Structures are given as C-alpha cells and as structure tokens.
Image (cartoon, rainbow, N blue to C red):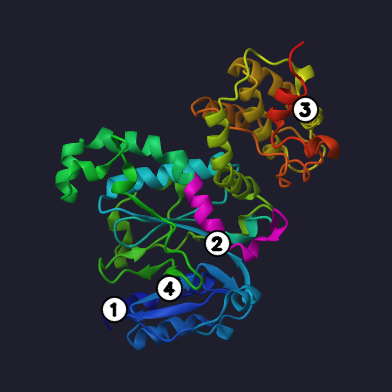
Amino acid sequence: MNEILKYYSRKDVQKQIILSSTNREIAAKYNENFGKRPDILQFESDVLELAKKGATSFHVSVEHWSNPLDLKPGMNKKQLDDLRIGWDLLIDIDCKFFDYSKIAANLLIEAIKFHGINNIGLKFSGNRSFHIGIPYNSFPKKVNNLKTNLLFPDSIKVIVYHLKNMIRDPLSSGIMELSTIDEIATSVNKPKKELMKDNIFDPFSIVQIDEMLVSSRHMYRAPYSLNEKSGLVSIPIKLNKLKNFKLSSAKLENVETNIKFLDEDKSEENESSNLIIQSFDSFNKKKEEVKIIKNKITIKGKVNEDRFPPCIQKCLKGIKTDGRKRALFILINFLRNMNWDIEDIQKLLMEWNKKNYEPLRDNYILSQIKWHKEQSVKLPPNCSNESYYKDLGIKCQENICNRVKNPINYTLKFKKPQ
C-alpha cells in the first residue's frame, strides 16, 4: 500500500473529508486531472474506494446545494440560484513567500474579528499559503431585501474588497519589516516599479488575496486532502497556532484530525451581518465619498447634539432589538464628521451603550473607536440604506429622508448654526 492510499485509509481522515462535503459538490483529482462532475461523497468508505482508483485529492464546492447531483454544465443563473442553499466565505491567500502569507492571514483574521465574528476557519492550503473561511449559516438570510443565497459570487468579491482595503497598510508595513523593496524585487524577479502603486509599495503585487476566481461551482481543496505538488496535507489550524505553524505538521505521517475547518455548529445567528452589510456599504459608497470631497462639503467646529438628525437622535436613545454593532458603526462615522474628538466620542458611546437592550462589551467599543481613529473620516451609511436605519427602527420621517441622502446632509441643510 503506497503512502497516499495508507493515509486515506485512516478512518479519522475519511470522517473529516465526509464532514466537509455535506451538501456540497465534490470532485476527486487524479494527479493532474479531475474526475467526473457533479459527484458527492456519502460514506466514509467512498474516500478509500476513490483512493484505490487513484484519487490523490478531494475538492469541495464553496456553495451548498439542495442536491449537488442535479448540477449540470451550462446551467443559467436562475437554475443555479434555485439549487443553491448558501455559500461559505472562502478567502484564498496566494504568495510564494510563506512568511508573507502568515502576515496576510493574521491581518485578515483580525479584520474579520473586528466585525464581531469569532467562528473563523483557518486552513493551510497544502503548499505555501492559507485558506480563511466563514460558514454560510452565520450570514443573515437577507441583505438589502435580497436573499443572501442569491448574492453569489458578488458578496464574496465585495467582502474581500472591503477586507483588502482594511489590511493594505499594515500588510505593507509587515512585509517591509522583513524585506526591502530591492530584496523583494530580486526575489520575485520583477522591476521595482511593478511593486509600486502611486509611488508606494503595493503589498498585493506579491500577495494575492483571491476573489476574482470565485464563480459558481468553484471548488477548493478539502480539509485533510493532499496537495499533489507539495506532498503536504491541507490541514485546519487553530487561530492562535498560526504564528508558530510549521510545514512539518502537514506531512502525511504527522497529520492530526482534531480540528474542523468550517464548524457550522459554532456559528451564531447573524454573526456575519456587520461584515457583509459594511462591505456592501463601503463598496457602494465610493462614488458618494468622491462627490463629497469634490464639492468640498465641510463642517466647521464641533457640532452639538441638538443639530443631529432625527435618526441619530433616536439611535442615541439606545437600541432595543438586534443591531447594536451596526448602530455603533453609524454613530462613530457620524460623530467624526461632526468634528467630535475621539475622547468625546468614547465618552458618549460608553453612556449610549448602557441604554441598549443588552450592552456591548466595552473592549469591542474601544477596539472599534481605535480602528476608526487610524482611518480617514468616512461618511455614515446613506439614509436609503435599509440594512442600517430601517432595520434598526431609527429611520427618519419620510419628508426628511426624501430630501437628504446622508445624515450629515441634514445637519448641513436643516440645522445650520444660528
């Protein structure tokens, strides 16, 4: 029995691969070629039987299907949408330098945690990098009145765009602490100018965080499946073990199977709401930000609370149902536009938090304020964004909402200083 067949004959390995294939399309790979599609794995013994036929690795779909075997080549969007019951957020980091991949993975994890998400999957790709995932059942069922299962693959592209913007500067700094531009250019055999963007080192010129390859029926290497090129296994990793992760842990003879990559049982309902809503808001608001800057709309001096719009006034009275984190996001951005300093924002928000139906952790509020302090001032979500104002029960009166696009416009238009 060769080493690969011996590995896939392990009952614990078979069990983990089966767990990762529930409601997903699978494909067995035979060295360089994939087997038939669509296919599924039903029993643990299926893994060994395919390995006996020469399967060297197993791949699973990002999407969850009501019946994967109903999938066919050439299906249109509606047909795929009707079969899809959900999708996992799967981020693929690709870089030839393992230490850079570690930096990127750690920053992405911290950026995801920033949005109040704790159930995050981390997996060694089996070669030089990592996969980061969030289970589908932690996302809300609807976003902007659209069913989330229909927002594939756009949602993943928008979320990754948002996360990349969050980590760009710290990723650049982290890489530059390890290597100079000259050293990087030599290592990747590129002229320095190809590593720059606007005369600044662009970390994504050497670290690819993949969102463009996501398409319907896109697959990734299943947890505990072999990577044919490296001979290493794609193994899940505990988040706190990333820094000290060694490639030797992924050798066939060293693999332990005590971690699940995407554990749906640990997801909290709507845990990923803030991430997907803020990602779409950030993506859609780019034109509005440019317009504000172009027209040089500014507010001078700190604005008193009596000049705040009704929606912000209502929000400051406390949130009585779910949505405290979204409300916090609105308030921080609004207050910064009202020229409140960080100390005053912190004081107000700590008092506001006591009025909520259930207070947020102080550390969560402080971490949000700290992050926003380090960013340029952004607009709060637009008034038309129902995922914020209407869902939180703090929407303004119709006669006001129809006349302003953003809460700060209310202060500029209706509440000018006397």
Amino acid type, mark 4: His
First in residue order: circle 4 vs circle 2:
4
Q: Is residue 152 magenta?
A: yes
Label 4 to label 3, Cα distance in Å? 52 Å
Q: For marks 1 and 3, give the one nearer the viewer.
A: 3
Q: Nearer the viewer, residue 400 or 145?
A: 400
Q: CA distance from mark 1 to mark 3?
A: 61 Å
Q: CA distance from mark 4 to mark 2?
A: 14 Å
- In this figure, which residue is indicated by the disc labeled 3? 309
Residue 110 in percent (x, y) is at: 48, 41
- Inspect the image, locate mark 3, and give the three-letter code of the amino acid beneath it: Pro
Q: Residues within 10 Å of mark 3 (few under 14, many from 20)?
A: some
Residue occupied by mark 1? 32
Q: Is residue 60 magenta?
A: no
Residue 293 position (above or below residue 23): above
Specify whether residue 43 is in view. yes
Residues drawn in magenta: 141-162
- In which quarter of the view is residue 220 placed? bottom left
Q: 204 left or right of 113?
A: left
**Helix, strand or loop status at disc 4:** strand
Mark 2 or mark 3, which is nearer to you?
A: 3
Q: Which residue is mark 2?
A: 88
- Where in the figure is residue 180, as x and y percent of width and height? 20, 35
Residue sitting at x 43%, y 40%? 167
